[in-house]
Amino acid sequence: MNVRVQLSLEHHVGAIDRRIFSGFLEHLGRAVYEGVYDPGNPLSDEQGLRRDVMDALRPMDMPLVRYPGGNFVSCYDWQDGVGPRDKRPRRPDFAWKSTESNTFGTHEFMDFCAKLGTAPMMAVNLGTAGAREAAALLEYCNLPRGTSFADRRAANGRAEPWRVKVWCLGNEMDGPWQAGHVPAQVYAQRADQAGKMMKGLDSSIELVACGSSGRGMATYMEWDRQVLEYCWDGVDYISAHRYSNNSGGDSAWYLAEGVEIDRVIEDYAALLGYVRALKKSDKRVYLSFDEWNVWYRATNMDGAWKDAPPLLEEVYNLEDALVCAQYLNSFIRHADTVKMACLAQIVNVIAPILTRKEGLLIQSIYYPFVAFAKHARGNSLRPAVDGPCVKAGGRGEVPAVDVSAVHDAEGKSVCVFLINRSLKEAADVVVRVAESRLSGVTFAEQTTGASPGLANTWENPRAIVPTPCIARIGESGELHVSLSPLSFACVRGAMAQTK
């Protein structure tokens, strides 16, 4: 099949906020313990951080990592996780029916962030705690010495504040499963009170209010409307969460997931515009898509009160990788709305990396994320795509090739991200840039395989790895890309001259 993509440097959505390539680490299963933190393991450093895991995470180049949850945060007392480890209490975790040792807490997480080269995105407990506890944590993290909690931080080994920039006001408070779940208006009051206290201590921070936990919620958008109307002046973002699945075993339907992701983001864009108009406000509030991934196979959430039980250890295949790439394509196409996004999660729990004591396994979803994080820099362009559609079951017909594109003015290049949804048919894609000829292909890589269910395993860890993609520049300076069926491609072209 033939697909034509027309780009114009003058028709862009806006600058891509690199925080859309962020991650999420929760005290859940083996995400922390035996994941990023494994003291005594020969693969761990002097602080107990797994060196091999850190090495695998670095190419993901995550600007932020959200922590400590997730459902976990709604029963978490952050003071349990600071001070001498041998004096930290062991607690039952309501969310995941596990036992929390608290040997990894705020200081250990900040050390992890520093070594990884990322920044913390801290969540506060607004389920079973409130504004006072949230303000105390902010004081502990961000204020200079001279007050009680800041001095306590110094006594625990950190003299200078961490100055955490981004804070989440609770987690999924619309969900009945959440400890401390309340109606929207009650949550909005809690969030507003906590936010005012926190910004009163540090006016430089940014705040994320809880939005809907998913489009399937009965209160979807109505919850968000009430929260935004009440908290508009105090918050900077509203959160969205989505987990995709192919529980019906329909690959054609599943590979059209990007259509639904677009719809969720466009729902939020419309709501944000509505509330802004209602408020007659000059302020902008943006979307933080701070939980997203594929999740539907590994669903056991009961840890039987064990320490770091193996929970939610999803095994990812090729079609999962193509769906994750569609999330990232959608974030780029909606760069004017989505300013932060967090892959949930990063190690062991619904994650691109699985660990054993003796090593790790890279899963299929890792590779598209790394490609986007490395090459999606600059302005998001508006692609005009002319090509065939594929049948997607109950979703009708959708474009066969899903496209996003980026113009890097500093690097004088254009990068396109292409997903061929077709199960059997290859695609020849021609990309033209209205104002410029392309002079050469500087990067061309694809992730593909023979079947949608192909996955990396401990026995065959390289079943899915990126391979070179066939790409060339035509006589008129256009880019030609050959896409295999069931593939994701990242192709970057150098710009020759501007008309």
Image (spheres, grey):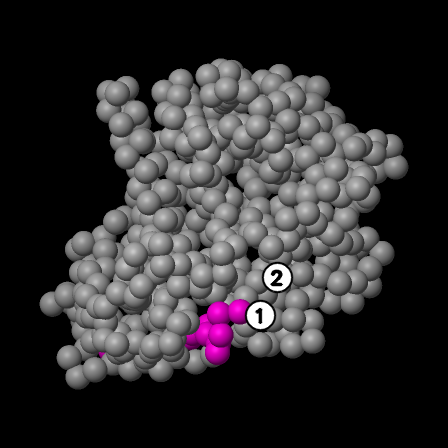
Magenta span contains residue 3: no
* Identity, as a three-letter code, of the amino acid under mark 2: Val
- Residue 182, given in percent of the width and then of the height, sits at 55, 20
- Residue 202, given in percent of the width and then of the height, sits at 52, 25
- Against 315, residue 78 (above or below) is above
* Identity, as a three-letter code, of the amino acid under mark 1: Ala
Residues at badges 2 and 1 in contact (C-beta under 8 Å)?
A: yes
Q: Residues within 10 Å of mark 1 (few under 14, many from 20)?
A: many
Q: CA distance from mark 2 to mark 1?
A: 8 Å
Residue 64 in the figure: left or right of residue 357: left
Q: Earlier in the sequence, mark 2 or mark 1?
A: 2
- Residue 174, given in percent of the width and then of the height, sits at 51, 28
Q: Which residue is mark 1?
A: 455
Magenta span contains residue 449: yes
Seen from the viewer's position, the closer of residues 263 and 498 is 263
Which quadrant holds residue 427? bottom left
Residue 80 in the figure: left or right of residue 435: right
Q: Which residue is mark 2?
A: 315
Region in magenta: 438-453
The residue lying at 27 percent from left, 48 percent from top is: 14
Q: Quadrant of the N terminus?
A: bottom left
Q: Residues within 10 Å of mark 2 (few under 14, many from 20)?
A: many
The residue lying at 47 percent from left, 25 percent from top is: 203
- Against 183, residue 167 (above or below) is below
The residue lying at 81 percent from left, 39 percent from top is: 305
Residue 469 in the figure: left or right of residue 64: left
Q: Residue furthest left?
A: 499
**Number of marks in the rendered image:** 2
- Residue 147, given in percent of the width and then of the height, sits at 67, 19
